[in-house]
Amino acid sequence: MQSEKHKKAAVGAFLNRSALFLLMLPVAFFFWALHAYPAHEACWLGVATAIYVWPVAGVLFVIAAGFHVGPASQRMKTAAELRQAHGH
């Protein structure tokens, strides 16, 4: 049981970090494009990157919410309530 919670927490952390990386990617791409293209085109490339990448980041955040693992005290409280409800 503990390993399953650890796996869920690891997957959730991976998805959150991936989504945060995708949120920062257009800014990094913009700064890269400033050196390779004129400023006007670099702005449009940054905006275009954000338009295509940010929805993917949003989907990753939604999926990561399904892997959320609450704090240990909250899990222990929930487990105690379930045991009491089932007469254990």
Image (cartoon, rainbow, N blue to C red):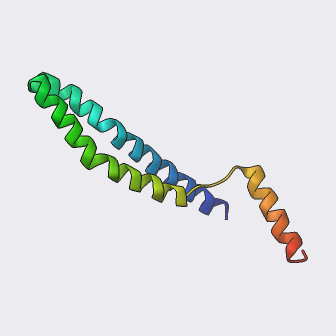
Q: Residue at x 78, y 50 (%)?
A: 73
Percent of width and height locating residue 82: 81, 70
Quarter of the picture containing the N terminus is bottom right
- 34 to the left or right of 81: left
Q: Nearer the viewer, residue 4 or 25?
A: 25
Q: Determine whether 44 is above or below 68 in the image.
A: above
Q: Determine whether 41 is above or below 83 in the image.
A: above
- 4 to the left or right of 25: right
Q: Residue at x 27, y 31 (%)?
A: 28
Q: Residue at x 44, y 44 (%)?
A: 17
Of all residues shown, which one is farthest toward the bottom?
86
Q: Determine whether 70 is above or below 29 in the image.
A: below
Percent of width and height locating residue 77: 81, 57
Q: Quadrant of residue 85?
A: bottom right
Percent of width and height locating residue 81: 84, 65
- 11 to the left or right of 35: right
Percent of width and height locating residue 39: 13, 23
Quarter of the picture containing the C terminus is bottom right
Q: Residue at x 57, y 53 (%)?
A: 9
